[in-house]
Amino acid sequence: MKKRMIFLIPVAVFIGIFILFQTVFFIGFVPSESMEPTLKTNSLIFGMRVFGDLSEGDIIVFEHEDKILVKRIAGTAGQKIEAEGKTYLIPENCYFVMGDNRDNSWDSRFWEDPFIKKSSVIAKL
């Protein structure tokens, strides 16, 4: 009976860690040079899935067009952003994001729908 109990301890620990990484923590990597020099390409990143309000300057991990991306929030709901000769008014519950490496970043400035919905944010670094 004691042998079965010993086996249950690592299983319980594994399940606990798995649940934490599905609900609280995020581990990933930076897929491109768009956030250099702040975050190097292929760097391992650690974020929090539980976060409060997001604001301009925060680095977020989000889903966009079936890809997981990392960018910095350049504007939040209600703000006007000027980029690439265009003016954007950011709608409620949305963000305008850009990479720190502006010359090598495919971000809100170039997307057909330039806004990231709050519900698409996975984690905050």
Image (cartoon, helix red, strand yellow):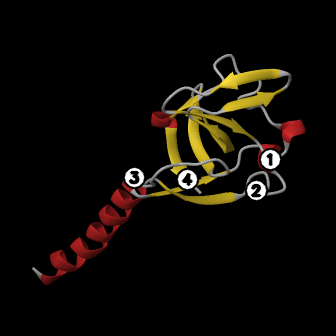
Mark 1, Cα crowd under 10 Å, few <14 / some 14-19 / many 20+, is some
* Residue kind at label 1, given as amino acid type: Asp
CA separation in Å, label 1 and label 4: 16 Å
Viewer-nearest of labels 3 and 1? 1
Viewer-nearest of labels 2 and 3? 2
Q: Say whether disc 1 or disc 2 marks the residue closer to the N-terminus.
A: 2
Numbered circle sitting on residue 124: 4
Q: Say whether disc 4 or disc 3 marks the residue closer to the N-terminus.
A: 3
Numbered circle sitting on residue 39: 2
Q: Say whether disc 2 or disc 4 marks the residue closer to the N-terminus.
A: 2
* Residue kind at label 4, given as amino acid type: Lys
Residue beneath disc 3 = 22
The residue positioned farthest toward the right in the image shown: 103
Q: Residue at x 22, y 72 (%)?
A: 8
SS category of the residue bearing label 2: loop
Q: Say whether disc 3 or disc 1 marks the residue closer to the N-terminus.
A: 3
Residue beneath disc 1 = 100
Q: Quadrant of residue 63?
A: top right
Q: Position of residue 72 (x, y in %)?
A: 69, 46
CA separation in Å, label 4 and label 3: 14 Å
Viewer-nearest of labels 4 and 3? 4
Q: Do tag 1 and tag 2 residues touch (Cβ < 8 Å)?
A: yes
> Is the residue 84 above or below the residue 75 in the image?
above
Q: Residue at x 90, y 37 (%)?
A: 103
Q: Position of residue 55 (x, y in %)?
A: 58, 48
Mark 2, Cα crowd under 10 Å, few <14 / some 14-19 / many 20+, is some
Mark 3, Cα crowd under 10 Å, few <14 / some 14-19 / many 20+, is few
The answer to whether 15 appears left or right of 55 in the picture is: left
Q: Residue at x 31, y 73 (%)?
A: 10
Q: Position of residue 1 (x, y in %)?
A: 9, 79
